[in-house]
Image (tube, helix red, strand yellow):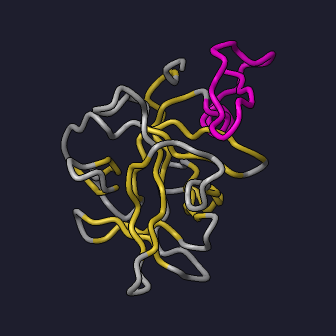
Amino acid sequence: MAVESTGSSPEPTGEPTAKSETGSAAILAGERQVVLRPVQTVESVLHVDDRGHLALTDGESPLSLFVLVPVREGKHQIRTAKAGGNGKPACIGLKENPAGSATLDAVACDASKAGQLFDFEAGKKNQEGKQTYAIHTDKDYYVRALDETGVEAVGATTPDTTFVLVDNGAAPSR
């Protein structure tokens, strides 16, 4: 779907692009909804938990589908495919803490806010031949999956967690 600029947060117009894209290109164009699966886990995927934090789950979660909304060249918002309690989808945002750590939380979508823009850096293909990506924030943190439940943002020069973008159908029109 095409994206038009409406101020601080891009909104899809609902119109298809002139040429429909497939695979990773369609995902990175915001046309598909995906689950973000860390390569290092077997069944875990990212989701927004009941406290509004980005976390890992092995089960069903209403907020485990995401749309990667292109904002500008190479930068995306990670938006929930479904609306939250306020009737609107949320975006993943980085929150830097005084102790020097950072968390990733569901926040109101606003592409002008620092911490809501992410790069998806292509890495090696996994054992099934699927493209993997490191997720890097605009504030120089990488998204890291911890053991079986946690997700954190870490300042690092190289990522230690990569993700497969698992296609789950057309993105909802907004």
Q: Which residue does the image show at 34% across and 55% down from the upper left?
A: 54
Q: Which corner quadrant of the image does residue 13 belong to?
A: top right
Percent position (x, y) of residue 73? 78, 48
Question: Is 99 placed left or right of 74 in the picture?
Answer: left
Percent position (x, y) of residue 122? 65, 58
Q: Which residue does the image show at 65% across and 50% down from the upper left?
A: 112
Quadrant the N terminus occupies: top right
Q: Main secondary structure of the magenta part?
A: loop
Q: Which residue does the image show at 63% across and 24% down from the upper left?
A: 12
Q: Nearer the viewer, residue 77 or 142?
A: 77
Question: Is 71 placed left or right of 153 in the picture?
Answer: right
Q: Which residue does the image show at 29% across and 51% down from the upper left?
A: 52
Q: Nearer the viewer, residue 97 or 165?
A: 97
In this rendering, the answer to whether 124 lies above or below 63 is: below
Q: Nearer the viewer, residue 110 or 104?
A: 110
Percent position (x, y) of residue 11? 63, 28
Queried whether the magenta region covers residue 5, the answer comes back as yes
Q: Nearer the viewer, residue 23 or 4?
A: 4
* Span shown in magenta: 1-30
